[in-house]
Image (cartoon, helix red, strand yellow):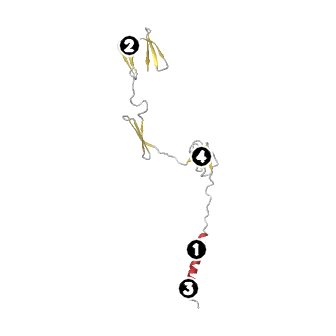
Amino acid sequence: MINTNKSKVMNKKIILLFSLLLSGFAFSQTTVTLQDQCNCEVLNGTAVSAAGAITPSGADTGDIYVNTTTGAIFFWDGDSWELTSTDDQQLQNFGFNAGTNQLTLEIENGNIVTVDLSALNNTLAETTSTLVDNGNGTFTYTNEVGGITTFDSKITTVVDNLDGTFDITDDSGTTVTIDT
């Protein structure tokens, strides 16, 4: 005699097992078809050096161009070669503090850059040379470093020595050299 309770339980287990196997088989038959979206090529050379270039021609949308001189990378957008990345930030504000010789630049993203210009030559502390009429027919010249030269106003010749100095000869034949 067959035990019907055991038979029913066994049938349920077999049906459950069969269902699981069938569902696993169904999931394993899922197909994904990938379409080729880009037959992209990577080109290189020096023909493309700036965004907007239209040569070399014959490129497909998405092609990449590497400039072998600059290392810049461009992509073909269908009409022209464009940079893959760029920083087009604009200068928003700038200022100069004459007391500290600090140049301050503010760019579009809010970053502020300060540059110390005090180490440069020709800062705002400019020195000047002077020429004073002594009222007796002579002049006194004082150069930028404080060197003083007095000469007669009756000059007959001035010679540029091409080394930053000038020879001034008056009508009596006296020559004075001025270092500018």
Residue 162 locus on image (x, y percent): 49, 19
Element under label 4? Answer: strand
Of discs 3 and 4, which sits in the foreground? 3
Q: Would you name the residue on which mark 1 appears?
A: 23
Binning the other alpha carbons within 10 Å of mark 3 as few (below 14), some (14 to 19) or many (20 upward) gives few
Looking at the rendered structure, the number of numbered marks drawn on it comes to 4
In the image, 170 versus 121, the foreground residue is: 121
Task: Compare marks 1 and 4 and give the one earlier in the sequence.
Answer: 1
Q: Considering the numbered disc 2 on the image, is that residue within a helix, a strand or a loop? A: strand
Q: Earlier in the sequence, mark 2 or mark 1?
A: 1
Up-down relation of residue 46 to residue 136 (above or below): below
Earlier in the chain: of badge 2 and badge 3, it is 3
User: CB atoms at circles 2 and 3 under 8 Å apart?
Assistant: no
Q: Residue furthest bottom?
A: 1
User: Which marked residue is nearer to the observer: mark 2 or mark 3?
Assistant: 3
Q: Amino acid at mark 4?
A: Val
